[in-house]
Image: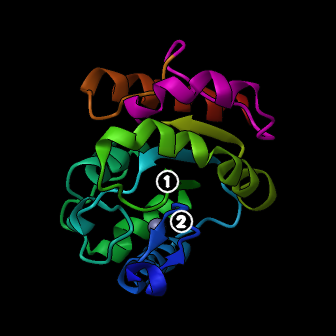
Amino acid sequence: MVTKNLLQCDGCGQLASPEHIAKRLERLEWTTRYRPVHIGTLLLGAAAPSEDAEFLYSPDGAFAGEAGAVLAVAGVSASGKAADAVLAEFQRTGFLLTYVMECPLDNENVLQAELSSRIPALVARVRRSMRPKRLVPISGDLQPLTRELQVLDLGCPIVLDGDKPFAIGDAAAAEHLRQALTAASASAR
Ligand SMILES: [Zn+2]
């Protein structure tokens, strides 16, 4: 049996190799280091990126792709700073980035089904552990789940770009999100 060494991964629900589980724990540890005590804005991606360079909390500090877009939305500049200084600043602003599926997904064809299956685990994490002031979906891949997220009791409001997630890879959507967050933090005072 090839499955004998596989364990169910709590980050993605897939049957996974020991290497996969180790990588999941590493990402969790990197993230926990910069988790705010009180989470203001929980940014929600679809699935963790497969490259560490695009994983925001990776200590290599490449801040490539999505990681760079997330920093820009939070108004944090990485220029000329060490990775830990950048991530500490992101943490101080009350932001945390998490994913519906906390591991990369090899097969993009099953993304929607996999994301959907992870919703109950997400709701439990948000309600019991993270308790953010607001949740902001930041991936266009979350569009089909938006209705479902809205009717679930997450314990906090969901901030949307009209009726869609903020696809922050797009400059206009990222700007909309910056404006929405400025308004939200002003009204929270
Ligand atoms: Zn996993």
Mark 2: amino acid: Gly
Which stretch did the figure color magenta?
Answer: 139-163
Rendered residue at 42%/62% (across/down):
103
Q: Horizontal and vertical percent for residue 32?
A: 55, 74
Relative to 1, is 178 above or below? above
Q: Which residue, given by chain and number where applicable, does mark 2 sit on? A: 11
**Could you tell me which residue is drawn at 36 percent across and 29 percent down?**
167
Q: Quadrant of the C terminus?
A: top right
Name the residue at 59% across, 69% down: 10
| Label 1 close to label 2 by CB (< 8 Å) | yes
Q: How crowded is mark 1: few (under 14 residues within 10 Å), some or many (20 or more)?
A: many
Look at the image and name its color scheme: rainbow
- Residue 128 position in % (x across, y down): 81, 58
Q: How crowded is mark 2: few (under 14 residues within 10 Å), some or many (20 or more)?
A: many
Secondary structure beneath dot 1 equals: strand
Q: Which amino acid lies under the numbered mark 1 shown in the image of this protein?
A: Met
Q: Does the residue labelled 2 lie within 8 Å of ligand 1?
A: yes
Residue 24 image position (x, y, % from top left): 45, 74
- Would you say residue 137 sits in the magenta stretch? no
Quadrant of residue 141 within the rendered picture: top left
Residue 155 colored in magenta in the image:
yes
Q: Residue 123 vs residue 2: left or right?
A: right
The answer to whether any part of residue 138 appears in the image is no
Residue 174: horizontal and vertical position, in percent? 35, 30
Label located before the other in sequence (1 or 2): 2
Whether ligand 1 has any atom under 8 Å from the Cβ at mark 1 is answered as yes
Residue carrying label 1: 101
How many numbered marks, from 0 up?
2
Which of these two is toward me, 119 or 31?
119
Q: Which of 23 and 68 is in front in this view?
A: 23
What residue do we see at 54% from left, 32% from top?
Answer: 181
Q: Would you say 170 lies left or right of 157 here? A: left
